[in-house]
Amino acid sequence: MEHLVTKLSDQIDNMNQAIDAKMDGYNPKRDKDITSSIIRILKRHSRTAISELEEQKIRNSIETAISSETRIPIGLTWGCSGGALSTMKLRERLNYPRKGDLWGIWWFDILNRKIKHHYEPGIDLIIGDEVPHFHALGWAYRDIVRKHEIMKNLAEQHFDFIRIIAIPDYDVIVDSSDISASSMDEILAIATSLPYDSIPREVFDLLYSKRQAKNWSWIRNKISSEIWDEACRVVAKANKIGRMRKELGFFDNIFGTSLYIDAAFTEKDRFCPKPWNNTLPQHGASILTSPKGTGKYSIAIVPEYRIEEQPLEYLPIMINALEFKHFTKYPIEDTSYTFYWIPRER
């Protein structure tokens, strides 16, 4: 198959240049109300509306940081140590970073720079990596820990305001009430991420496309009870671990305070950063569009089977896994895989 080859150093340079181009000329008027200026930035970069109650919590966190002249703490949960095992979403079952994963880290440099324009200390970002979720999904534990280590070291060696810390695998017992509390959308996302090839393509066609009402009875009829029940258990465990994380004060203990911005990529009413055009890179391949000379840098996450069905539209960019060998103590295969896709030039 026709493809191009890239190196990690080139990709890092490319992302840094894109960020520099985006920030070139960024000079909004400084407001005397620093807190309100920062909240406007967060709202502009959130995929969902922030509720009034959450906005007040954010305001309190920012004002506390400003009064002590420290960085603004942001606690973000993101399972960056794994990805879908379904070959419809990601063709290659190799648990190494892809372009969307890296951009999910680098994007926060844009957010930090914009906030530093108004408040010099900037942000203190802790990413709570949802490591236990991917073990429940079916990944070997070594593969998960290796990717966690790569992502952690890449982030922390390039940015002094980012730390990635694994969320513990809390000892939780899932019961029927936990399962019944799970949403159908959550269950479908996991069912289509499990390592089974028996779910028909028509179900995947519904994912991450234009929002429309789902025919749940039809979907349930297309997915076996065994797969659906397994997905229910995985979702229920993930949600219970999430509740346990909050009850035990995972971020509170790291920051030393309960006054931090509580962020997530998928939950409503909170600050939900949007590095990608649609869903998270754990659910598909990365398509990069960056028109020359525009300074724009856009990544969409798309189930990979859709991209492969358009060979005249997209070209794969490959990378060798050994590019990441300096960021982990675990063995890495000498193998190349699709790092991302680009539209073919006309």
Image (tube, rainbow, N blue to C red):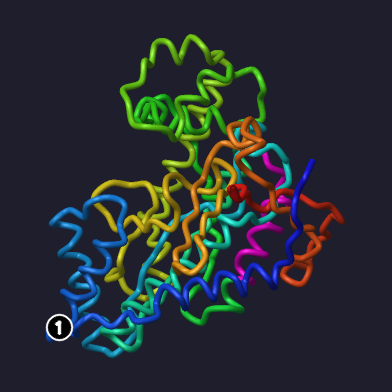
Which residue matches tag 1? Answer: 31
Residue 332 belongs to the span the image colors magenta: no
Coordinates of residue 222 in the picture (x, y in percent) = 52, 12
Q: Position of residue 257 (x, y in %)?
A: 32, 73
Mark 1, Cα crowd under 10 Å, few <14 / some 14-19 / many 20+, is few
Q: Between residues 45 and 296, which one lies in front from this camera angle?
A: 296
Residue with the most extreme right position: 334
Q: Is residue 213 left or right of residue 338?
A: left
Residue in the image at 64% along x and 17% along y? 198
Q: What kind of element bears circle 1?
A: loop
In the displayed structure, 321 sits above or below 287; it is: below
> Is-magenta flag for residue 139?
yes
Residue found at x 53% / y 27%: 191
Q: Relative to 29, does residue 95 appear above or below in the rendering?
A: above
Q: How many marks?
A: 1
Residue visible at 77% across and 72% down in the picture: 326
Classify 39 as above or below 24. Answer: above
Above or below, 43 relative to 24 = above
Q: Position of residue 140 (x, y in %)?
A: 72, 44
Q: Is residue 247 left or right of residue 85?
A: left
* Residue range of the region highlighted in magenta in the rendering: 138-154
State which quadrant residue 97 falls in.
bottom right
Q: Quadrant of the N terminus?
A: top right
Q: Amino acid at mark 1?
A: Asp
Please identify the quarter of the rendering in which residue 77 is found.
bottom left
Write the residue at 63% across / 51% down: 340
- What secondary structure predominates along the stretch shown in magenta? helix
